[in-house]
Image: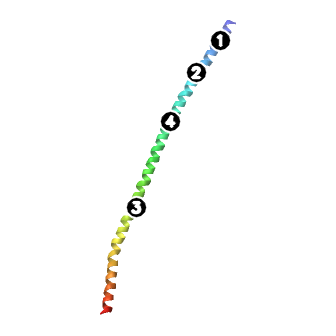
Amino acid sequence: MAEKENQEELEKKENTENKEQNQEENNVGEMVSKQDYDELDDRYKRILAEFENFKKRNSKERETLYNSILSDVVEVILPVVDNLENAVKAETRRRRI
């Protein structure tokens, strides 16, 4: 009988130890999960910031490209417009004479 009681006590101790070990493992698991969460959160924020910077940079590049193209077009058209204005003035002078 004493042997049976000793056996039961040993099993209870083992069960208690197993429960404590499981709780410790769960706590470590929660800490790892928190650490993983923090790493993912940091990574998300960095990627979001990079994307915002990309959008701003892309917008500035588009505006610069638009202005560059516009100035090229004006540079090509301006002499033509000047010549047309001179032609109109020349035609007007002939009629008056």
Quarter of the image where the C terminus is located: bottom left
User: Which residue is located at x 61 percent, y 17 percent?
Assistant: 14
Q: Position of residue 29 (x, y in %)?
A: 54, 30
**Mark 1 or 2 closer to N-term?**
1
Given residues 91 and 58, the one toward you in this image is 91
Q: Residues within 10 Å of mark 4 (few under 14, many from 20)?
A: few
Please report contact status of discs 2 and 3: CB closer than 8 Å, yes or no: no
Quarter of the N terminus within the rendering? top right
Residue occupied by mark 3: 63
- Sequence order check: which comes first, mark 1 or mark 4? 1
Q: Position of residue 75 (x, y in %)?
A: 33, 71
Per the image, the residue denoted by label 1 is: 7
On residue 20, the disc is 2
The vertical placement of 96 against 25, above or below, is: below
Q: Amino acid at mark 2?
A: Glu
Taking the spot 51% from the left edge, 37% from the top edge, the residue there is: 37
- Secondary structure found at label 1: helix
Look at 45% across and 51% down and name the residue there: 52
Q: Residue furthest right?
A: 1
User: What element does badge 4 sit on?
Assistant: helix
Q: Quadrant of residue 7?
A: top right
Callout 2: 10 Å neighbours few (<14), some, many (20+)? few
Measured Cα–Cα span from mark 4 to mark 3: 40 Å
